[in-house]
Image (cartoon, grey):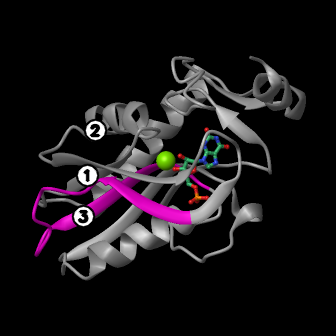
Amino acid sequence: MRLLFSTEEIREKVEDLASQIRGDYQGKKPLLVGLLKGSFVFLADLMRALDQPLEVDFVRLSSYGHGTESSGRVRVLHGLKTPVRGRDVLVVEDIVDTGHTLSYFLESLARRRPASLRVCTLLDKPCRRCVPVTIHYRGFTVEDVFVVGYGIDWAEEFRYLPAIYALEKAECASKTSSP
Ligand code: XMP
Ligand code: MG
């Protein structure tokens, strides 16, 4: 496993994103919508760094099985319960990869007529994009590596790591072949 971003680098980036967002949402009470499970650690830190009135809700979508490749199909495992009509919605994502998940979700949100709809992602892997998505607040750009830690898993492992790491191909393979 190779360290990509230390806890200190993540903390600084979260502060930086929060100050951009705070500036853009002055006098507003945004609804932060986190995509479970990967975004929950980032959202928790971002929310506290924002330090302004806001609401939080979560959805759970799935386009990944237990592996490292997006299937391109998105399923809703837990939909959004908070009404979004007229709300300033900020979607909070851990990582945008092919863009399938986010583009599917943004289309479904847009149909519900929010006052505004923006995206904040901690990590962006633009080299893997299949579907275009507009990202308003971007933390780090990463190359084509599978990342874990800071809430982000590989087959439900490694979420607990406080920093962000690249998982080497051999590690994915050895996990897949283990009993
Ligand atoms: P898409 O391809 O739809 O994928 O943009 C978005 C979701 O896929 C997960 N994902 C990853 N999870 N390491 C992970 O642990 C990765 O490198 C990675 N790339 C994508 C993630 O949940 C994201 O929301
Ligand atoms: Mg995610």
Q: Quadrant of the C terminus?
A: top right
Q: Amino acid at mark 3?
A: Val
Q: Which mark is residue 101?
A: none
| Quadrant position of residue 23 | bottom left
Q: Which residue is mark 1?
A: 32
- Residue occupying the point 51% across, 17% down: 160
- Answer with mark 3 or mark 1, whichever residue precedes in sequence: 1
Q: Main secondary structure of the magenta part?
A: strand
Q: Which residue is mark 3?
A: 89
Circles 2 and 3 in contact, beta carbons < 8 Å: no
Picture coordinates of residue 136 (x, y %)? Answer: 46, 66
What residue lies at 60% left-to-right and 22% top-to-bottom? Answer: 163
Boundaries of the magenta span: 73-96
**Which residue position is annotated with label 2?**
47
Q: Quadrant of residue 5?
A: top right
State if disc 1 and disc 2 touch (CB < 8 Å): yes
Q: Position of residue 152 (x, y in %)?
A: 55, 33
Residue 99 image point, x, y percent: 58, 66
